[in-house]
């Protein structure tokens, strides 16, 4: 059986990633694709423990510590879930992956994006998404979509949110074939349609003999 396809959805908090991951997985299954849906950080027993720590507003940590914890959760997710699924020919849809680390702790957090890419490749090896879709939305809009209590990562203010958006756009410009920007304004159905168009393009290439 040929290797499966690995797709990640990313973008700022409030962009609609979780909803769109679910809809994309449903769309792929309707077309006969076996799909594994996961989230990063999380997705394993170890990863969920790390996720709780990372999002705890009462937990204070340096940005370097934060970066390594994300990498640790991701390494476990790859070993336990993603790589075995791809070997079995399944499709993996992940809510965030390595790009989020590069943007949040790199472009917005002050660490070197290049060093984070290097560290990420140490954590996951060659297991990188075939396609990453960045849901792009203005910080004011994404913030308004997240009413109520915010987790530790969501409490960093408008300046941090602006840097996050610019970081995602910069990385997409650096690697436009693998990282595609999806405008996230409009209805859920409209955004889902844009995502499907991009995935269909990659599926066509993936299915070629």
Image (spheres, rainbow, N blue to C red):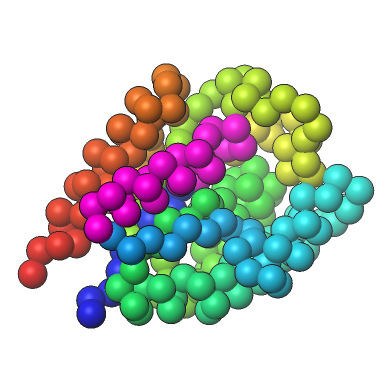
Q: Find out whether residue 169 is within the magenta segment.
A: no
The quadrant holding residue 131 is bottom left
Residue 51 visible within the image: yes
The quadrant holding residue 61 is bottom right
Residue furthest out toward the left: 209
Magenta-highlighted stretch: main secondary structure? Answer: helix
How many marks the image carries: the answer is 0
**Which of 59/122 is in front?**
59
Residue 153 in the figure: left or right of residue 103:
right
**Residue at x 41%, y 73% (from the top left corner):** 85
**Residue at x 20%, y 47% (from the top left corner):** 201
**Which of 166/87 is in front?**
87
**Which of 65/191 is in front?**
191
Q: Is residue 140 above or below residue 77?
A: above
**Which of 179/143 is in front?**
143
Residue 198 in the figure: left or right of residue 157:
left
Q: Is residue 197 above or below residue 105?
A: above
Residue 91 in the figure: left or right of residue 50:
left
**Residue at x 86%, y 45% (from the top left corner):** 57
The quadrant holding residue 5 is bottom left
**Residue at x 69%, y 71% (from the top left corner):** 45
Q: Quadrant of the N terminus?
A: bottom left
Q: Magenta segment range?
A: 10-32
Q: Find out whether residue 14 is within the magenta segment.
A: yes
Question: Residue 87 at what x, y percent from top left?
Answer: 35, 79
Q: Quadrant of the C terminus?
A: bottom left
Residue 132 visible within the image: no
Question: Residue 146 at what x, y percent from top left?
Answer: 67, 28
Residue 104 in the figure: left or right of residue 62:
left
Question: Residue 125 at what x, y percent from top left?
Answer: 47, 77
Question: Residue 189 at what x, y percent from top left?
Answer: 37, 27
């Amino acid at each position: 059986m040929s290797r499966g396809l690995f797709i990640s959805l990313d973008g700022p908090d409030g962009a609609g990633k979780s909803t769109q991951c679910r809809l994309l997985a449903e769309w792929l299954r309707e077309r006969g694709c076996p799909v594994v849906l996961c989230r990063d950080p999380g997705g394993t027993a170890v990863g969920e423990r790390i996720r709780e720590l990372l999002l705890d507003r009462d937990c204070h940590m340096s940005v370097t510590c934060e970066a390594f914890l994300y990498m640790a959760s991701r390494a476990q997710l790859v070993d336990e879930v993603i790589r075995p699924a791809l070997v079995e020919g399944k499709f993996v849809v992940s809510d965030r992956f390595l790009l989020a680390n590069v943007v949040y702790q790199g472009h917005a957090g002050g660490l070197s994006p290049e060093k984070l890419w290097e560290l990420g490749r140490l954590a996951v090896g060659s297991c990188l998404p075939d396609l990453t879709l960045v849901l792009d939305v203005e910080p004011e809009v994404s913030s308004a979509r997240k009413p109520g209590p915010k987790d530790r990562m969501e409490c960093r203010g408008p300046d941090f949110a602006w840097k996050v958006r610019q970081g995602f756009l910069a990385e997409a410009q650096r690697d436009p074939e693998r990282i595609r920007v999806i405008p996230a304004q409009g209805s859920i159905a409209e955004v889902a349609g844009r995502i499907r168009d991009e995935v269909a393009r990659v599926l066509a290439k993936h299915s070629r003999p």
